[in-house]
Image (spheres, grey):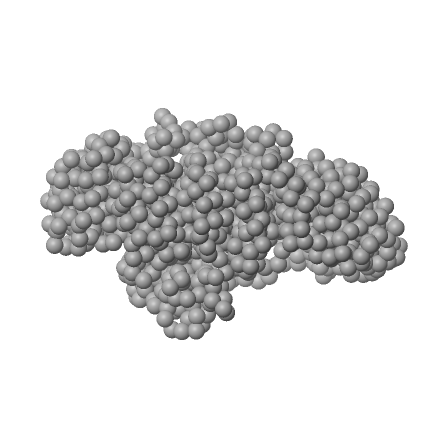
């Protein structure tokens, strides 16, 4: 077996570089989005107001601040407003945006519905805690906004279906925060699998990074701050009520999985299972999920191929590794930007850029391009829906500790009422999907 | 008191879910437990248990409850703190009892709690609720009225639809909007049931209503798609719209329509649309699944200019054939940079062997103007045209030679790799060397027989000097394999500083485990290597020990060897991290050995603790060591501790409070938790100990395997 890493190390990308990359990697059709002609840019790389996309942010914490940076570095983005239930975050994000844009135009909101009422806003970046992702995305779509939403995007199977259905109905552009879909080595690895270069795919492997529950709960009540400082009711949002406790104010971990299940499989699965799904041609999710055994969980697609959640035995290629095995070859890739191939011939003369540290710049650009073209972004709602359902179903199998079977027509589990009751969860009043 | 009952107190039920829901960080095994008993959960709701326990009981009833639980759950619908929890169960429990409970609540609840109940009725699509929902439509609280309208939309039967249509003209704009949303759901259901005419009528009613733009847009999309080919006229209206939002829905809806004769309506419109819009329409037309008419796009590419032409040229790359080659070559030579780039990309993507044949034919007869482009395209398409590329190496123009080299790198077969080796080793033009090296590397790393490739490169390397030698060594390293490893090792042992630099860097990043013995031998005495390279070698060895898959025995052996070569505290600490990562008796012993080194004693102690903790081992030997040396003094408060498995939990807070001292480690009087806590809360089952604590005033929480040594992590 031949193992070889790719060697074409790339510096930190810029947009112009990205456009060049798109051409140089032309052999890999999956890498680049369409080209926005340079004529869309002004002489100094500036974009006329009529060509700008007006973006607002909802729930901009740590991850959101990183995403915001990716948006702000795009010349055709005007960041107009921020909504956060925490006053400190509202103020901090306004400062970042205003400093970058050289004005004081970024407006602040505590209730995202007021922000969505603004007709001048084209798109929203949603980087709240996962508790809010699906609900806020669906409200934004109904308000006519395009959406870049951090992952995991949904808390259960029904939310996943409603998210995709709403995006179709409203005609909105939706990009899940699955930025690895816009990195060349992951895209190449997935393209190898999809195009048959590895032979018929037998197994795809995803690293769940801990098949653990990671959700938060009901802690001892503490004095609730003034609503202007922290709006606890809005923070809870669709999550069932519980008293204020500052320890729960970590949006990243709050109600991550929802329901009785959730956690690690969803947290990382929304990346690495998503890549496996892409390798499988964005197929419907697996139909059969075994109980966990020896630290791994095996699911099966309709065509018999296996999706394996595996903690160990990875080639050291960084976090979020994936591996695709076909009848004639395999490929493994990770966040280092490197990949290992069963045969160097799979490269077939292509140069695949080695971009580590999973930057979201390209993914944001893909989203913005699709906002303009109304094209289908890499992390579109249908793809995200299928990947999330695979994760949610795996979590149900983990929780019930038994094999479950999914009917792809109804998206219900076959002859398993307990599993079916875990497909959805009521939202706290007044929120609805 | 409820808390004295056998099934437990607040912590018991809490803990039943803790493992799966509240605490986080529990492993798969901890989530495996027997289903809770419904009567026990109902008893919690009936008791004076705290709300948090009742909340979790509701969550459990969502999975394990039945009609029996409905009456108690229904009582919580009027409780502002528990209503949302109760609805989690009531939405999930099948049967008419839950429907009835939610339906009955519509006449009793007020405000947001009523909105919640309405939403749950909507989720369950309870048709018997239509009458009750109709009574709520005129409610003065618009949130209630709007929720009722949305619920009617989800139910979507004839009665619901009629009510919603009436509300499209309501005086309240919010209600009109939600009624429109409901009508769109109803239209979808009509279409799904085969009533296309009814769906179109309903969509058109919404389109003509005084409702917000997003609703009209949604209805417009529905109206276009439901009309099939007849919808193209309506679609073109959107493409013409001065309102960006309607133009956008036209564009995205076009992508949902399969190609057909009706496309001609859109093609005819291209000349009327602003170029930027028309270009995006061309992109949308070609992106649709299904066969499209190639000649249409060829005509657009010929007849239009600017953005529309670029879009058509891009389209040819996706759907074109050999008949497009001439057109694309011409466009590649355009002075419009965007057009030229698009054409080049399309030439690269154009599918088919006949395209390759046509390109070779043109390459052989190429003029100066197109030669460089065609050379480049040969490489980008991975076509085999070695003869033509080699011929171009003799060209007087360095740019032509560079293009030929690059394409050779992408395409040269294994039996002709020597062409590129020769270009590096004996270049006819030294200015070509960078391009030749890049080409050789690109070719070398895709060679199927890498041992043969490495051997050929090794020979060239041995005959080279200076920067060429270093560059060739880099390429050898990129190829990998046994021969390459031997070549790089020899370079590391050379007395050439630059070669040592390159070789040790390559070895430090080597991707296979066979580099370990090489690194170990290089780390030994008498090599004569510069100190900075020596460090690189040691760290490379540690990297393999840390990252690569191997047996426990092999890893322990590597760690023992590493201990011999790690001379500096920084490297020794890296080794301790590896020991912690792979806990076992042998790594524990190695960590103990490391404690003898004063500079890393604290780190070694921490490693021993971590290993012991992971092994669930209360080593007497370790306790003795720790009691002698002591640990950092901390202010420690045990807030709460529970010991058990699944539902069977015992609170052991007081025991641990007694045992805790002013350090992170809590020494136990026995290695057996059952003895320490004088109870076995779950006989025969693997148990866990969960401790909530405050260290130096900061809260922390840890869950330990049964009988693990208790060493509380530092709090952040």
Q: Residue at x 66, y 56 (%)?
A: B603
In the depicted structure, whether residue B69 falls above or below residue B582:
above
- Toward the bottom, the furthest residue is A103
* Rendering quarter of residue B275: bottom left
Residue A386 location (% of width, % of height): 43, 39
The image shows residue A418, relative to residue A251, as above or below, that is above
- Where is residue B638 drawn, in percent x and y? 47, 55
The residue closer to the viewer here, B565 or A381, is A381
Q: Quadrant of residue B325?
A: top right
The percent coordinates of residue B605 (x first, y second) are 66, 54
Q: How many callouts does the rendering have? A: 0
> Who's the residue at 69% across and 39% down the image?
B384
Report if residue A390 is visible in the image: no
Residue shown at 37%/68% (left/top)?
A106
Q: Look at 43% across and 63% down and name the residue there.
A: A77
Q: Position of residue B191 (x, y in %)?
A: 25, 34
Is any atom of residue A81 visible in this view?
yes
Left or right, B638 with respect to B168, comes to right
**Towards the viewer: B708 or B468:** B468
Q: Toward the viewer: B583 or A261?
A: A261
| Foreground residue among B309 and A192 | B309
Q: Quadrant of the N terminus of chain B?
A: top left
Left or right? Give the position of A260 relative to B531.
left
């Amino acid at each position: 077996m031949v193992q070889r890493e790719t060697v074409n190390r790339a510096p930190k990308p810029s947009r112009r570089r990205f456009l060049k990359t798109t051409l140089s990697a032309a052999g890999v059709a999956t890498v680049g989005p369409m080209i926005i002609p340079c004529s869309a840019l002004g002489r100094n790389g500036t974009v006329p107001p009529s060509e700008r996309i007006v973006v607002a942010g909802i729930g901009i914490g740590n991850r959101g601040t990183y995403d915001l940076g990716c948006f702000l570095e795009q010349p055709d983005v005007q960041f107009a407003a921020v909504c956060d239930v925490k006053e400190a975050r509202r103020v901090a994000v306004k400062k970042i945006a205003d400093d970058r844009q050289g004005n004081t135009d970024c407006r602040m909101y505590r209730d995202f519905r007021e922000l969505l009422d603004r007709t001048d806003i084209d798109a929203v970046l949603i980087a709240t805690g996962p508790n809010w992702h699906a609900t806020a995305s669906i409200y934004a779509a109904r308000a006519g906004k395009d959406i870049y939403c951090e992952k995991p995007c949904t808390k259960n199977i029904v939310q996943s279906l409603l998210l995709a259905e709403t995006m179709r109905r409203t005609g909105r552009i939706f990009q899940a925060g699955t930025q690895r879909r816009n990195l060349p080595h992951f895209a190449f690895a997935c393209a190898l699998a999809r195009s048959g270069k590895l032979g018929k795919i037998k197994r795809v492997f995803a690293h769940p990074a801990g098949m653990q529950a990671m959700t938060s709960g009901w802690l001892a009540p503490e004095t609730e701050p003034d609503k202007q400082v922290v709006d606890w009711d809005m923070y809870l949002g669709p999550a069932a009520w519980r008293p204020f406790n500052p320890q729960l104010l970590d949006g990243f971990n709050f109600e991550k999985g929802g329901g009785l299940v959730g956690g690690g499989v969803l947290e990382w699965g929304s990346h690495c299972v998503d890549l496996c799904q892409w390798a499988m041609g964005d197929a419907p999710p697996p139909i059969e999920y075994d109980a966990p055994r020896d630290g791994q969980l095996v699911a099966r697609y309709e065509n018999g191929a296996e999706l394996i959640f595996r903690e160990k035995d990875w080639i050291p290629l960084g976090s979020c590794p994936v591996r695709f095995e076909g009848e004639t070859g395999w490929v493994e890739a990770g966040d280092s930007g490197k990949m290992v191939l069963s045969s160097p011939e799979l490269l077939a003369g292509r140069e695949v850029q080695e971009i580590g540290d999973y930057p979201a710049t390209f993914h944001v650009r893909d989203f913005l391009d699709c906002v303009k073209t109304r094209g289908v972004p890499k992390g579109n709602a249908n793809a995200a829906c299928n990947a999330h359902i695979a994760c949610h179903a795996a979590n149900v199998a983990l929780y019930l500790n038994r094999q479950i079977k999914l009917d792809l027509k109804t998206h219900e589990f076959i002859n398993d009422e307990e599993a079916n009751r875990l497909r959805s969860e009521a939202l706290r009043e007044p929120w609805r999907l | 008191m409820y808390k004295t009952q056998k099934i437990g107190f607040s912590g018991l039920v809490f803990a039943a879910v803790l493992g799966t829901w509240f605490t986080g960080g529990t492993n798969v095994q901890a989530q495996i437990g027997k289903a809770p008993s419904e009567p026990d959960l109902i008893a919690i709701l009936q008791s004076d248990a705290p709300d948090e326990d009742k909340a979790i009981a509701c969550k459990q009833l969502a999975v394990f409850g039945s009609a029996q639980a409905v009456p108690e759950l229904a009582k919580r619908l009027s409780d502002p703190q528990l209503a949302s929890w109760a609805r989690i169960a009531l939405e999930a429990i099948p049967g008419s009892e839950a429907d009835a409970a939610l339906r009955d609540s519509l006449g009793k609840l007020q405000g947001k709690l009523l909105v919640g109940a309405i939403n749950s009725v909507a989720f369950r699509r309870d048709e018997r609720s239509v009458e009750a929902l109709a009574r709520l439509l005129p409610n003065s609280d618009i949130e209630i009225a709007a929720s009722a309208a949305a619920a009617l939309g989800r139910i979507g039967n004839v009665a619901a639809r009629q009510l919603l249509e009436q509300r499209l003209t309501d005086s309240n704009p919010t209600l009109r909007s939600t009624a429109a949303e409901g009508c769109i759901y109803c239209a979808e259901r009509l279409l799904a049931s085969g009533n296309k005419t009814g769906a179109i009528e309903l969509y058109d009613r919404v389109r003509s209503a005084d409702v917000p733009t997003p609703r009209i847009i949604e209805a417009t999309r529905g109206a276009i798609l439901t009309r099939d080919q007849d919808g193209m006229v309506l679609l073109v209206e959107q493409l013409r719209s001065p309102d960006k939002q309607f133009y956008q829905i036209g564009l995205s809806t076009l992508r949902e329509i399969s190609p057909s004769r009706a496309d001609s309506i859109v093609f005819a419109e291209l000349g009327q649309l602003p170029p930027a819009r028309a270009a995006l329409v061309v992109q949308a037309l070609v992106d649709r699944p299904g066969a499209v008419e190639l000649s249409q796009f060829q005509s657009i590419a010929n007849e239009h200019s600017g953005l529309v032409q670029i879009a058509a040229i891009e389209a040819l790359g996706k759907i074109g054939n050999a008949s497009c080659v001439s057109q694309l070559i011409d466009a590649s030579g355009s002075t419009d940079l965007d057009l030229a780039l698009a054409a080049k990309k399309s030439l690269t993507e154009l599918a088919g062997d006949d395209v390759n044949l046509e390109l070779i034919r043109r390459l052989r007869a190429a003029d100066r103007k197109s030669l460089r482009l065609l050379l480049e395209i040969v490489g980008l398409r991975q076509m085999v045209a070695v003869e033509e590329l080699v011929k171009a190496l003799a060209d007087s123009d360095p740019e032509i030679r560079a293009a030929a080299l690059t394409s050779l790198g992408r395409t040269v077969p294994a039996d002709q790799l020597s062409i590129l080796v020769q270009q590096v080793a004996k270049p006819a033009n030294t200015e070509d060397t960078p391009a030749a090296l890049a080409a050789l590397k690109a070719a070398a790393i895709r060679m199927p027989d890498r041992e043969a490739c490495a051997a050929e490169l090794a020979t060239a390397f041995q005959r080279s000097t200076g920067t060429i030698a270093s560059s060739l060594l880099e390429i050898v390293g990129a190829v990998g394999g046994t021969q390459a490893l031997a070549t790089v090792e020899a370079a590391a042992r050379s007395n050439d500083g630059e070669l040592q630099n390159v070789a040790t860097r390559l070895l430090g990043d080597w991707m296979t485990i066979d580099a370990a013995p090489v690194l170990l031998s290089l780390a030994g005495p008498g090599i004569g290597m510069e100190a900075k390279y020596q460090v690189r070698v040691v760290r490379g060895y540690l990297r393999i020990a840390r990252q690569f898959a191997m047996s426990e025995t092999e890893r322990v052996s590597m760690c023992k060897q590493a201990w011999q070569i790690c001379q500096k505290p920084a490297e020794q600490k890296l080794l301790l991290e590896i020991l912690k990562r792979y806990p076992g008796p042998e790594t524990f012993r190695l960590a103990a050995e490391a404690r003898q080194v004063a500079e890393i004693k604290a780190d070694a102690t921490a490693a021993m603790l971590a290993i012991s903790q992971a092994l669930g081992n209360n080593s007497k030997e370790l306790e003795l060591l720790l009691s002698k040396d002591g640990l950092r003094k901390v202010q420690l408060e045990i807030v709460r501790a529970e010991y058990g498995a699944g539902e069977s939990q015992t609170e052991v807070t007081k025991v641990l409070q007694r045992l805790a001292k002013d350090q992170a480690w809590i020494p136990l009087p026995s290695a057996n938790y059952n003895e320490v806590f004088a109870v076995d809360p779950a006989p025969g089952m693997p148990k866990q100990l969960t401790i909530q604590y405050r260290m130096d005033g900061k809260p922390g929480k840890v869950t330990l395997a049964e009988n693990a040594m208790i060493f509380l992590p530092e709090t952040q």
